[in-house]
Amino acid sequence: MSDLNKTSKDTVKQNEQSSRLTGRPHRSVKRRIIQRVLVALLFSAGVIGANEMGWLNNISQQLTKQKVNWLDNKQVTQYLREVINDQKLSDTPSKCLVFVINNDNGGDIVDMQVREQHNNLCTNTRSDFPLLFTFRVNRTDGNIQIDKGTPNHFYPIH
């Protein structure tokens, strides 16, 4: 009988020290605070790391990217400026790039030359507009090709 009494007392003690639902021992307030601070620090470090690697920028750009009207040359050139910056296709500042649209006769495929502008705002002093590369844009499906490094031999940009 004393063994039965002893085990029932041990069970009662264990139940007093454990959570009612899970059967795990209670955590002290100090331990809970430390655990929450550690979780907050790890989460903050994760967010900072994701920001440093550019993951947050990529996600936000993908979520907020607007549809491009491929028939509107102004929207297409603005989109191509973003592509040049995102893909780091040129060291030339965006304000110093000039787009020259060739064979825009209402067809599906348009070639857009990207040339480097030279004036008092841009650092170079050349008087001509050297060709950097050409984009080939398919207006029906938004497919973009580029010939950078291989003139007149186009390959997909993305």
Image: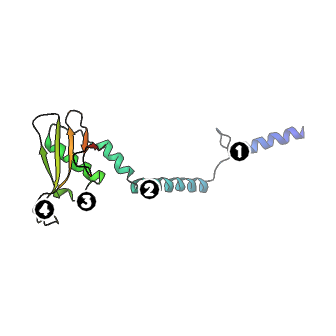
- Mark 4 or mark 3, earlier in chain: 3
User: Residue 16, located in which quarter of the rendered image?
Assistant: top right
The C terminus appears in which quarter of the rendering?
A: top left
Question: Which numbered circle lies on residue 16?
Answer: 1
The residue shown at (21%, 59%) is 93
Query: Which residue is denoted by mark 3 in the rendering?
Result: 91
Percent x, y of residue 83: 26, 48
Name the front one of labels 2 and 3: 3
Labels 2 and 3 touching (C-beta < 8 A): no
The Cα atoms of the two marked residues, 2 and 4, are separated by: 39 Å
* Quadrant in which the N terminus appears: top right
Eye-nearest disc, 2 or 1: 2
Q: Position of residue 90 (x, y in %)?
A: 25, 56
Rounded to the nearest angstrom, the CA distance separating label 2 from label 3 is 26 Å
Q: Nearer the viewer, residue 154 or 104?
A: 154
Sequence-first disc among 1 and 4: 1
The three-letter amino acid code for the residue at tag 3 is: Asp
Which badge, 1 or 3, is on the more N-terminal residue? 1
Q: Residues within 10 Å of mark 3 (few under 14, many from 20)?
A: few
Question: What element does badge 3 sit on?
Answer: loop
Instruction: Tell me which amino acid carries mark 4.
Output: His
Mark 2 lies on a secondary structure that is helix
Label 1: few (<14), some (14–19) or many (≥20) C-alpha neighbours in 10 Å: few
Determine the residue positioned at 18% across, 43% down: 76
Numbered tag placed on residue 118 in the rendering: 4
Which quarter of the picture shows residue 91? bottom left
Q: Earlier in the sequence, mark 2 or mark 3?
A: 2
Q: Are marks 4 and 3 in contact (CB under 8 Å)?
A: no
Q: Is residue 97 above or below residue 15?
A: below
Q: Amino acid at mark 1?
A: Glu
